[in-house]
């Protein structure tokens, strides 16, 4: 494998890497057992370096954290298969299975990720009665969390990538992770006042509303929806009024049959 | 800085097992297992377990955040984000892949470094703060409940000092600038006027030396 990437292991262990370098290294890691083994020790070492100072946490922090976790959903565990490719939540999220997705990422910088254009539906579509309100990713951390989740999906062993026909966008579907990701560049903008909305078309023709999303100025977007893929026949995109609809109100601008 | 005499003696102790190293801490193994168990339970939605993880690590998380971002308010934000992320992602922690402490501090460090970099436009503010968290340290002394934790923290801090002393000055400098100040390998190379490959190798060599010095299990 690329010696250049391999040589980043120390820098990676202390987070002395750019986002692109991090992605490159993590992709390398999935294919390099030596690096994986070495990294485990370097990570423990890096954590020990982090114990140079202990400063009693501010008085209000405990209550504030406990209050926030009370309204923070937890990520599901990874299965053994997932774990083989994703060592931990902050850890390697290798992209071997999604070279395409990786190239997409290389086409833009981290800053290029659509901050306001990213919509995520972290809850099950069904659990919220069909409509998943779009979540505008004003918070960079949420955006990074989404990006991480997306990379987890695109690197799932059963991830399938399909052209969406909206700019250079494509869908990545993982049945195992019960997730559909839509992402791409050069996506045309919807009409004024409108947003794109993702729909899951069921075998019986009914449609489950997915998140809305807006491409950013560069036409870049990324969104994902978690749902049991059993019985999902197709994924469609329509233009809907901002905020989304419970039923499609226009003909689809893109359809992908699964 | 070269290793001092007492350190040489300490390092001469045969150390086949982690327990036999001068850096081993009585009960450290048990604590690590207990913490891993608590983190696993946190991943299953056990809030009481999370609270115990919080109590065990919040001071370390906050200390690391403060060390890196310097600004007390930012440090508190980073600590909160990291601790909530611990809750959010706990189900993805795998004890067989590393310690709970390392997992939590990896999250914390990355958050802190990301924050420092996003604040780079205001880099000058980093220079404007006085002695590091003197107030926080004083707070800690005022809390009798933390006596045991404070001893543990002092032991860990001493281990860091000794480890850094075991590095060459250039290696130590490389980790000060990257791990503690958030430089990327490229920024390290440019600020020191060394080739990029040298910078990467220096960081790696420093980490390997520390790992071996601390007898970190591989």
Image: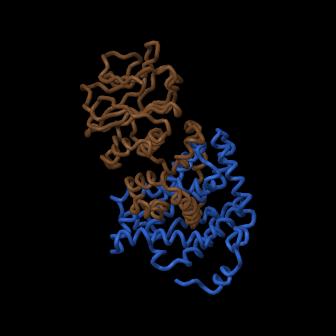
Looking at the image, residue A92 sits to the left or right of residue A243; the answer is: right
Whether residue A214 is visible to the viewer of this picture, yes or no, is yes
Foreground residue, B105 or A162? Answer: A162
Answer above or below: position of B162 versus B187: below
Q: At x 37% / y 31%, what residue is drawn?
A: A162
Quadrant (top left, top right, bottom left, bottom right) of the N terminus of chain A: bottom left
Q: Position of residue A208 (x, y in %)?
A: 45, 20
Looking at the image, residue B139 sits to the left or right of residue A244; the answer is: right
Which residue is the extreme one toward the front? A1
Q: At x 36% / y 70%, what residue is drawn?
A: B189
Q: Position of residue A36 (x, y in %)?
A: 53, 57
Q: At x 68% / y 53%, what residue is drawn?
A: B35
Q: Position of residue B115 (x, y in %)?
A: 43, 55
- Quadrant hosting residue B59: bottom right
Q: Please name the color used to draw chain A.
A: brown
Q: Which chain is blue?
A: B
- Quadrant hosting residue A104: top left
Which residue is the extreme one toward the top? A204
Count the marks: 0
Foreground residue, B23 or A36? Answer: A36
Looking at the image, residue A191 sits to the left or right of residue A6; the answer is: left
Foreground residue, B188 or B213? Answer: B213
Answer above or below: position of B110 versus B163: above
Q: At x 36% / y 17%, what residue is drawn?
A: A248
Whether residue B69 is visible to the viewer of this picture, yes or no, is no
* Colour mode of the rendering: by chain
Quadrant (top left, top right, bottom left, bottom right) of the C terminus of chain A: top left
């Amino acid at each position: 494998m690329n010696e250049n990437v391999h040589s980043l292991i120390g820098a990676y262990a202390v987070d002395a890497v750019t986002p692109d370098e991090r992605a490159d290294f993590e992709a390398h890691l999935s294919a390099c057992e030596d690096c994986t083994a070495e990294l485990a020790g370097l990570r423990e070492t890096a954590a020990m370096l982090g114990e140079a100072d202990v400063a009693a946490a501010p008085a209000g922090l405990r209550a504030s954290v406990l209050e926030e976790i009370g309204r923070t959903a937890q990520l599901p565990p990874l299965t053994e298969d997932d774990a083989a490719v994703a060592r931990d939540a902050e850890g390697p999220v290798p992209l071997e299975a999604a070279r395409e997705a990786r190239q997409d990422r290389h086409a833009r910088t981290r800053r290029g990720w659509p901050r306001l254009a990213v919509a995520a539906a972290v809850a099950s579509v069904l659990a919220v009665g069909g409509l998943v309100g779009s979540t505008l990713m004003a918070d960079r951390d949420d955006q990074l969390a989404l990006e991480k989740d997306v990379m987890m999906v695109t690197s799932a062993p059963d991830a399938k990538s399909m052209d969406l026909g909206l700019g250079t966008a494509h869908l990545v579907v993982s049945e195992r992770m019960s997730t559909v990701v839509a992402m791409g560049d050069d996506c045309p903008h919807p009409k004024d006042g409108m947003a794109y909305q993702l729909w899951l078309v069921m075998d019986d023709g009914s449609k489950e509303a997915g998140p809305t999303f807006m491409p950013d100025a560069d036409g870049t977007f990324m969104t994902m929806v978690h749902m049991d893929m059993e019985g999902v026949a197709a994924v469609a995109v329509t233009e809907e009024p901002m905020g989304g609809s419970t039923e499609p109100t226009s003909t689809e601008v893109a359809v992908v049959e699964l | 800085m070269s290793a001092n005499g007492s350190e040489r003696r300490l390092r001469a102790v045969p150390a086949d097992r982690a327990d036999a190293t001068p850096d081993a801490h009585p009960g450290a193994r048990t604590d690590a297992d207990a913490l891993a168990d608590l983190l696993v339970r946190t991943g299953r939605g056990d809030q009481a377990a999370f609270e115990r993880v919080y109590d065990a690590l919040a001071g370390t998380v906050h200390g690391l955040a403060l060390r890196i971002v310097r600004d007390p308010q930012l440090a508190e934000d980073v600590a909160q984000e990291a601790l909530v992320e611990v809750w959010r992602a706990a189900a993805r922690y795998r004890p067989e892949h590393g310690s709970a402490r390392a997992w939590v501090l990896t999250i914390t460090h990355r958050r802190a470094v990301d924050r420092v970099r996003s604040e780079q436009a205001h880099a000058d503010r980093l220079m404007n703060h006085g002695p590091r968290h003197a107030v926080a340290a004083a707070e800690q002394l005022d809390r009798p409940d933390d006596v045991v934790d404070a001893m543990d923290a002092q032991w860990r801090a001493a281990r860091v000092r000794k480890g850094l002393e075991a590095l060459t000055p250039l290696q130590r400098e490389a980790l000060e600038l990257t791990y503690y100040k958030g430089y990327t390998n490229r920024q390290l190379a440019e600020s020191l006027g060394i080739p990029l490959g040298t910078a990467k190798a220096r960081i790696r060599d420093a980490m390997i030396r520390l790992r071996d010095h601390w007898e970190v299990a591989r």
